[in-house]
Image (cartoon, helix red, strand yellow):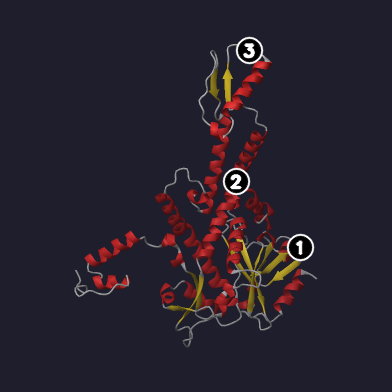
Amino acid sequence: MGVKRLFLDRLSLGRKGPPPTQQRANRVAPALSSKWEQELGVGQAWTPLSYGEYYLRSASVFAAIRIRQDAVVRAPLRVFRRADARRAGEPTGRDGLHRLASDGEARGHAEAAGPENPVQRLLDAPNPFWTRGNLWRATETYLGLWGSAYWGLERNDRGEVFEIWPLRSDRMRVVPDPDRYIKGFVYVGQGRQLIPYVPDDIVWIHYFNPLDEFSGLSPIAPLRLSADMGLAALRANRNSVANESTPGVFIETGDTPTDDEVREFYERWELRFRGPANVRRPVLLSGGMKAGNLGFSPKDMEYLQTMRWSLEDVARVYGVPKPMMGDLERSTFSNFETSRRVFWEDTMVPQLVFYQEALDQMLLPNLGFDTSGTFVEFDTSVIEALQESENDKAKRRQTYVSTGIMTINEVRRELNLPPVEWGDVKA
C-alpha cells in the first residue's frame, strides 16, 4: 500500500480540523524534487544515526544531555485553566490558545487544573509503559542529539488522545504540502515499515534550522568536529598508555653495570620502595649515581589540552557550565552555586518556555476534547538554584520596611510570626 493511500486512510478516521482552504502554505516553501521526497518526506539528512552515537561515545556529550534531562524532569509541568474560559463568545481551540500563550496577564488569573484534569492526567502518565520523567528525558535527549523531538498521539474511538509516545527522531520524516504546509509525517520502523501520521497526531518540537525549515538543527552539527578531536585524543592517549615503555624515574651512573648488578639493584629498589607504606621514602644513591624524573612529555600535555578544549565546546553548545560537568579544577562553593543559577536562568528557563509554547500550540488544540482556556507551565518554584537565599530575603525585607513598602507586621506574617503592637507603622 502506498504512503498516499495510508495518509488518506488516516485522514478518514474521523480527524477533526479546519478544511484545507482555511490553512495557508508557505509561499516560498521548497518544491520536492523526487517521488521519494513527495511520499516519504524530508529531514533524514539532518538526523543521521551517527549523531545519536555521540551519546554513547562521548562522555562530555552524555554528561551535558543527562544534566539537562534531570533539570527538565525536576520542574513539574502544571496544567492551568483560566477562570473565565467559558465566557460567551470566547475564542477556543488553536486561535484562543495562541493568544493566551502570549498573554501574561491572562495566565496570571488562571487556576491550577488539578490532578484529575484530563490534560494533567495525560501529561503525568503519558502511556502505560512510560513515566512522565522518562517522556521528558527522551524528549530532551532527542533534541540534544538531532534537534527534533516527536510525540506520537494515540486516540480512542471518540477521537480523544489517551496516550503519548516519544518517537525516535532519526526515523521520522516530514512530508511537506503545497496547500497545508505539512501533509503529515512518516515513521520508518523496523524492516523499513512505513507508519504515517497526520499532522494532528504529532507534536513536533524542533530547534530552528536556517538551512532547512522542515528539519531541526542538531547541537551535534556545530559540535562534532570538536567532539571528534576529544575522542581522537582519548584514543591516542589510551593507545599510548597501553604501549607505554617510558620509565617514570631514571638512574644515571658513570660506569656500565653488569647484568648481575642491574638485577641486584632492582631487587633492592623494589624491596625498599614497593607498597603504599613506602611511598615517598627517601632514597640513598651510591657515588656517581643520579636520579631524574621524566614527567609529562609535550605530547601528553597536548592530549590533555585537546580533551579540555573538547569539554569546553560541549559545555558552550549545550549551555551547561563546566563545574556542573565535573570540571572542578578552579571551582569553589561560591562559583559552583553561581554556575547552577546561571545554568537555570540562561539555559533551562528559556528551554522550558520553548516546551510550553510547543505544547500550547501543537498538543492542547489537538487532544480531541475541550481545552479552551487551558495552558501549561513548568513550576520552577521548586528549583533551589532560582530561590532567594536567606540573606537575600532578609536584605529585601529590610529594604521594604525601611522604604515604607511593607510594615514590620507584614514581614512577620510572611515568616509566620505573631504581630507586634508597634508593627503596623510604616517608615
Asked if labels 2 and 1 touch by Cβ distance under 8 angstroms, the answer is no
Helix, strand or loop at disc 2?
A: helix
Asked if labels 2 and 3 touch by Cβ distance under 8 angstroms, the answer is no
Q: In this figure, which residue is indicated by the disc labeled 2?
A: 227
How dense is the environment of label 3, judged by Cα within 10 Å: few (below 14), some, or many (20 and up)? Answer: few
Residue 140 picture location, percent across and down? 58, 61
Helix, strand or loop at disc 1?
A: helix
Type of amino acid at the residue the image marks with label 2? Ala
Residue sticking out furthest to the top: 255
Indicate the quadrant containing the C terminus: top left, top right, bottom left or bottom right.
bottom left
Q: Is residue 395 left or right of residue 48?
A: left
Q: In this figure, which residue is indicated by the disc labeled 1?
A: 190
Q: Mark 1 and mark 2: span between their CA atoms?
A: 30 Å
Residue 53 picture location, percent across and down? 66, 52
Asked if labels 3 and 1 touch by Cβ distance under 8 angstroms, the answer is no
What residue is shown at x 64% (from left), y 51% (from top)? 54
- In this view, the residue in front, 412 or 34, is 412
What residue is shown at x 32% (from left), y 71% (from top)? 414
- In this view, the residue in front, 2 or 365, is 365
How dense is the environment of label 2, judged by Cα within 10 Å: few (below 14), some, or many (20 and up)? Answer: many
Q: Is residue 183 left or right of residue 399?
A: right
Residue 307 picture location, percent across and down? 56, 41
Looking at the image, is mark 3 or mark 2 earlier in the sequence? 2
Type of amino acid at the residue the image marks with label 1? Gln
Residue 96 picture location, percent across and down? 50, 78
Tally of numbered tags: 3
Q: Is residue 74 left or right of residue 403?
A: right
Q: In this figure, which residue is indicated by the disc labeled 3?
A: 256
Nearer to us of marks 1 and 3 is 3
